Image (spheres, rainbow, N blue to C red):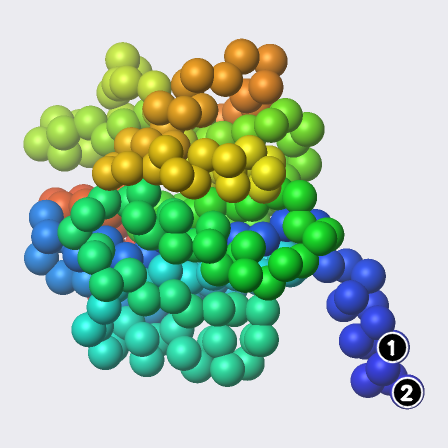
Amino acid sequence: MNSRTSIEDTERQTQNHAVIILASGLSQRLGQPKQLLVKHGEPLITYMARLALSTNPQIIVVVIPDNRRLIVSAITDLADQHPSVQIVVNSQPDTGMAHSLSLGIETIASFENPSINRVLIMGVDQVLLDEPHLTALLAGKQTVVASHYHSWQSLEKHQSLHKGASDIIGLPLAINYKLLRQWQSELIGDKGLRNLIRGLPTDQIGRVDNDQLSYDIDTPEQLAYAKQQGWLDE
């Protein structure tokens, strides 16, 4: 009886969104798979998938690169525990983020789940991303609710963000599912989604400020700094 009650509670809590985790990058600048960097004792790809699970989505699609056995192993255990986690392999990871996103959209569409009305899109390397930020994105009412932060300053200078650093409106973001489906054919290369979002009327774009998202991991210097700060395990 307790088990059944627990299942019913979980079903009631499930939200009307899906999640796409874009994790098929080859980490060429970093020199090692960022998906396998370790936070709180587990690979970053698993940590981010758990974060996505905390939002109680209908489906989580994790897009990973082809022929990366350790990445497959890291996420398969979680997928075995949670049927909502679907693993999709991108056989062309060097073609840019848009192809991964298109694969994620296609996978969500294949479930033909009529209750899904929004999609939360995430990466794996914003090491200070947390559940309250994802909740804030999903709470927005606009067509697109994106994260707003600044770019890294060169680490050779003060090990901090520069006040004049460029603004970024980007991932993670929540977007209307029907609109995302309409845009699917236009997604090309690395910046297809960002350019499409910029074309929307300003009143259709919400933003959630969070400068902690500035700290993504693309270079060995950024990785060393993140470990020094205790954001990633040694």
Residue type at the position of mark 2: Met
Picture coordinates of residue 142 (x, y %)?
A: 63, 25
**Disc number for residue 5:** 1
Residue 95, placed above or below residue 193: below
Residue at left offset 48%, top offset 68%: 86
Picture coordinates of residue 9 (x, y %)?
A: 82, 68
Residue 110, placed above or below residue 212: below
Residue 206, placed above or below residue 226: above
**Foreground residue, 80 or 185?**
185
Residue at left offset 31%, top offset 75%: 72
Which quarter of the picture shows residue 149? top left
Q: Are marks 2 and 1 in contact (CB under 8 Å)?
A: yes
Q: What is the C-alpha distance between the residues marked 2 and 1? A: 6 Å
Q: Is label 2 in a helix, a strand or a loop?
A: loop
**Disc number for residue 1:** 2
**Foreground residue, 18 or 36?**
18
Q: Is label 1 in a helix, a strand or a loop?
A: helix
Residue type at the position of mark 1: Thr
Horizontal side of residue 142 vs 169, given as left or right: right
Which quarter of the picture shows residue 111? bottom right
**Disc number for residue 54:** none
In the picture as drawn, the residue positioned furthest to the right comes out as 1
Picture coordinates of residue 190 (x, y %)?
A: 25, 37
| Mark 2 crowd level (few <14, some 14–19, many ≥20, 10 Å Cα) | few
So how many labels did they put on this image? 2
Horizontal side of residue 121 vs 119, given as left or right: left
Q: Is residue 224 visible?
A: no
